[in-house]
Image (tube, rainbow, N blue to C red):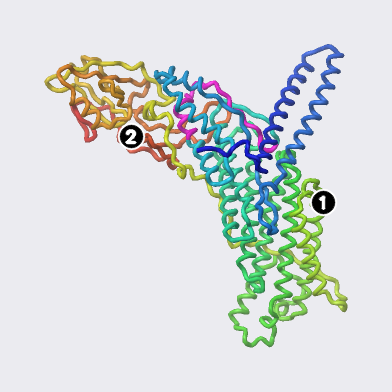
Amino acid sequence: QQGCDPFAQTQRSKLQHRRARINQQINKEMRMRAGAENLFRATSNHKVKETVALELSYVNSNLQLLKEELEELNSSVDVYQNDSESISVPMIPLGLKETKELDLLVPLKDLISEHYGEEGILFEKEIKEFMELRQAMRTPSRNEAGLELLMEYYNQLYFLDSRFFPPTKSLGVFFHWYDSLTGVPSHQRALAFEKGSVLFNIGALHTQIGARQDRASLPGLNQAIDAFQKAAGAFNYLKENFSNAPSLDMSAASLNMLVRLMVAQVQECVFEKMTLLRAQHDFLARLQLAQEAARVEDVYSLVHQTMTQAHVKDYVPFSWTTMVHVKSEHFKALSHYFAAIALCDCPGECYSLEAAACSGKCWLHHEKAFIQFHVTMPEGPSLRVLLQDPEERRKLGKAHLKKAIMKHEEAMRLHGLCKILRKMDILQEVLSFAHKRSLSKYSEIDHEEDFFETGDAPDIHPKTHQKPEIKSPNFSQVKVTDLFHRLGPLSVFSAKNKWYPARRVHLMRGENGFGFTLRGDSPVLIAGVIPGGCAAEAGLKEGDYIISVNGKDCKWSKHAEVVQLLKSTGEEGVEITVITLQSSEGPKAADKKAAAMSSGSGMLKSNKENSRKSLMNSKSASTLLVWSKKSKRSKKSTYGIPFTAVGDNEAMY
């Protein structure tokens, strides 16, 4: 698969290029600052100290300007929105984390030669294919294909980890990634940092796909809901399974904020979906809309609280914090507006004393809905009188509209405080339209003879008919083949296992056969050796793995295939190549299928991430499986038996 053309001049790619350029400049300035600070501490020359202090002030000033420029880029949410002419509130997407190019050719060739005893040059094609996949992953297209590309690379990292990252030794390469929001560079040797960064980009790409949907249509809203739920799932998975991240965007506090932000954006889409589906003139539908809007206000208030916490406040762009605050006030205003509309505009005959045609069931249903509508009961007459008296409904509706107008004005005031949001015409348009609509309705129901003071409307009880779902990434959705399957099955040929140099043995068939017992597939194991037999005299041992017969590679061969090769030998005998694992626990431990391994020190994975298993078949195709799922073979493997006791899955030759 290929990424999108990195030179394609789309609005989004231009933005990403500018982000990459600023990231590099920030990196340069930070190196200069580190050097200047070291010199300042090291020198005792007063004149040099003054010069360095002046240089530091310039560097810090440049860094501040670059970070402000990057913040403005991260606030360019309009670039990621859809091109529809319909007016909808903009969503907040994330830019992708940038990474440096990585040359793995020499390190992997060296490790293949050193650890696997193979010619590294013979695996250049596979190494280059992996590097091309990584290069493509840096510029994923903003669609399902882009997500599949990121997921494919993420799944390939499992095999890279198993093949080339021993638990006790470093590969010697650094993975460089830039912080998504600040541009500050980070690097680690741990492959977990690479995996975590790719997972972050999967979540970020979901946010971009969600933001670009046309939310004026039902299919667009459903796609946006799905995308934001999957983004929340990716960030939540990252938070629960990776720790000690070197960059702030992947810290627990930041990821918690991002999960809550995505959930809030899902809730906003649910409200928009209700406005499309529900009949606007229906009393109950308007009460539900008011409660949905109150729910959106509730979740955005929680996001705003999270964004203003100590560890997050100085990190999150000011425009994000302001927009979340604006949305909180805006949806609170909408909840009061729809409450007023329900009270003032719905057909009065359903609640009047003259409504003999209205069934008692309908009345009870409406009364029950209204009892649960407010957080505290409104002051004044009883609920029944309130619903039956048009004048009382108008008074309460007027109180709700008064509160709605106040909240609209607060949202517009907050919007005006942020320079970046002021440039966002569509948001200004949405806020202005909602404000004018509430003012117009207030003027319509306001009577000249009203001498009563408009009371304070109680808050509306938040309620939703569709709770957001945090959808964890489905890694098995994108099936991948181990690029380095020629090295052999992971059950034996992995970075965590060590084996003695391969031995070539010439074996003659005796009267009682070769004198050994074979078990299993890929590779076939010598489970027992008859003392004094041909195999024992040739130097074969219990626990040896057969990797070739007469020069034919047998690492992936099935039991029957190896047996057929042995049986087809003539009087001249057969040449077998075997390896013996270096393991204190013997072959029993070696026969277990490979689990996902730790990527060394630094950013460590939790037990969930480490417990991941994979099944490999003879065709080398592999699907990443559910956690803790083990292969059947690992459960059945027993080795402490004499050669005479041949089990069902063994055969003596």
* Nearest to the observer: residue 8 or residue 556: 8
Instruction: Establish if 447 lies above or below 259.
Output: below
Report the side of 628 relative to 416 (left or right).
Answer: left
Residue at 76% x, 50% y: name it. 424
Q: Which residues are magenta?
A: 156-181
Please say whether residue 167 is one of the residues in the magenta stretch.
yes
Q: What label does residue 206 carry, if any?
A: none
Residue 256 place in picture, x, y as percent: 63, 44
Mark 2 surroundings within 10 Å by alpha-carbon count, few (fewer than 14), some (14 through 19), many (20 or more): some
- For the point 82% across and 54% down, the residue is 413
Q: Nearer the viewer, residue 627 or 73?
A: 73
Question: Which disc number belongs to residue 416?
Answer: 1
* Residue type, label 2: Ser
Q: How far is disc 2 from disc 1 in space, using C-alphas?
A: 64 Å
Q: Which residue is mark 2?
A: 618
Q: Quadrant of residue 404?
A: bottom right
Q: Which one is earlier in the sequence, the residue at label 2 or at label 1?
A: 1
Residue 120: image quadrant is: top left
Based on the picture, tell me whether residue 278 belongs to the magenta stretch. no
